[in-house]
Image (cartoon, rainbow, N blue to C red):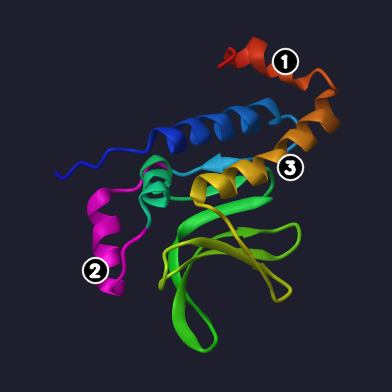
Amino acid sequence: MKKIEIDDIIKQQFEYYQNMCSLLSDFKDSHFDPPGDIEKIEQWEKDNGTNLPHQYKSWLLLSAGSNILDGFIELSWPEIGTLDERNDIIIIASIIGDGETVYISRTDRKVYSIFEGEIKEYNDFDDFLTIKSLYIETLAKEYLGDDWGDIYDKQFGSE
């Protein structure tokens, strides 16, 4: 069985997302699918003639699909999509609250999102996760109060 090293930053992000979802579980439902299989990922890449960025592959190796906070973020198995009438994107997530689609460009392998025709570029998959975690922290403040960070640290230990 082939093994790939999971990106440490993505592993930390994954754990943070799981912890935040656990912290907010009385208010919002979340679900993380079991880890994906590297052979299945590589077969998908071969079948679609493209390579996925290492950080996104790392997330798939931690969870093949994730429904976070009542679908605020749905990270999914990759799917070929189109912009400009070409099969030029790989759809990886949706932000349900506002209809935003998150994708990887097949041309430059960068992470982008599109909402109402406006495209936003992220530095990488980690940057996308970091920016979306700000919304999760806003929810934590709304549901748990200003001391949500202390509650988090008490429950999960500070990093």
Callout 1–callout 2 Cβ contact below 8 Å: no
50 magenta-colored: yes
Quarter of the image where one finds residue 35: top left
The residue segment tinted magenta is: 34-52
Quarter of the image where one finds residue 93: bottom right
Q: In the image, what residue type sits under mark 3?
A: Tyr
Q: In the image, what residue type sits under mark 1?
A: Ile
Q: Is residue 17 left or right of residue 143?
A: left
Mark 1 or mark 3: which comes first in sequence?
3
Q: Which mark is residue 135?
A: 3
Q: Is residue 99 left or right of residue 94?
A: right
Q: Residue furthest bottom?
A: 85
Residue drawn where x is 33% and y is 38% of the image: 6
Quarter of the image where one finds residue 8: top left
Q: Which mark is residue 46?
A: 2
Pinpoint residue 4: horizontal percent, then vertical percent: 24, 42
Residue carrying label 1: 151
